[in-house]
Image (cartoon, rainbow, N blue to C red):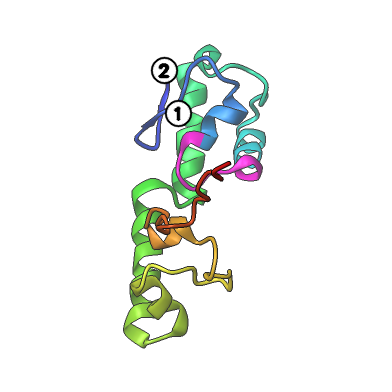
Amino acid sequence: MPRIAGVDVPAKKKIGIALRYIYGIGPRTALTILSDAGIDPTSRAEALSEAQVAHIREIIEQKHTVEGDLRREVQANIKLLKDMGAYRGSRHIRHLPCRGQRTHTNARTAKARPRIAIAGKKMAPQAK
């Protein structure tokens, strides 16, 4: 199981897919990294040599912000929005969607609240 950018990528998966387990690397970035390294995206992660894994590590360190650094950067950006008093920052503070989605219904994930059952909503069985 190769360890890249502090993450154990799955050995049985193709390296083009396995790189996506690293925070900050998506499909497009994974293919770009592999083309820069000269590695076939369809090869399995366990089949890579140590030299190839080291080359992938170097490319990621030089050209891409991933994992802890990226998480800190995102959190710093959110904190800046909050400190500035921006509308998006206030939405983050209230744990509501900040990209224009509706909140009358839905937004359960953003609100982090379970659905609330309304009493008396169920219909009683009819008596004959």
> Which is more toward the observer, 41 or 108?
108
- Amino acid type indicated by mark 2: Met
Specify the segment rendered in magenta. 21-29
Q: Which residue is mark 2?
A: 1
Percent coordinates x, y for residue 113 in the rendering: 37, 57
> Which is more toward the observer, 99 or 17?
99
> Which is more toward the observer, 95 or 81?
95
User: Where 17 falls versus 110 (above or below)?
Assistant: above
Which quadrant holds the C terminus?
top right
Percent coordinates x, y for residue 108 in the rendering: 46, 57
- In space, the residues marked 1 and 2 are separated at their CA atoms by 13 Å
Percent coordinates x, y for residue 49 in the rendering: 50, 16
> Which is more toward the observer, 40 or 54?
40
- Residue at x 56%, y 45% (from the top left corner): 126
User: Where 19 falls versus 79 (above or below)?
Assistant: above
Quarter holding residue 8: top left
Q: Which residue is mark 1?
A: 54
Left or right: residue 120 versus residue 20 is left
Give the class, few, some or many, for how many residues have Cα within 10 Å of label 1's Cα (few <14, many ≥20): some
Foreground disc of the pair 1, 2: 2
- Residue at x 51%, y 41% (from the top left corner): 59
Q: Earlier in the sequence, mark 1 or mark 2?
A: 2
- Residue at x 49%, y 51% (from the top left corner): 122
Quarter holding residue 110: bottom left
Give the class, few, some or many, for how many residues have Cα within 10 Å of label 2's Cα (few <14, many ≥20): few
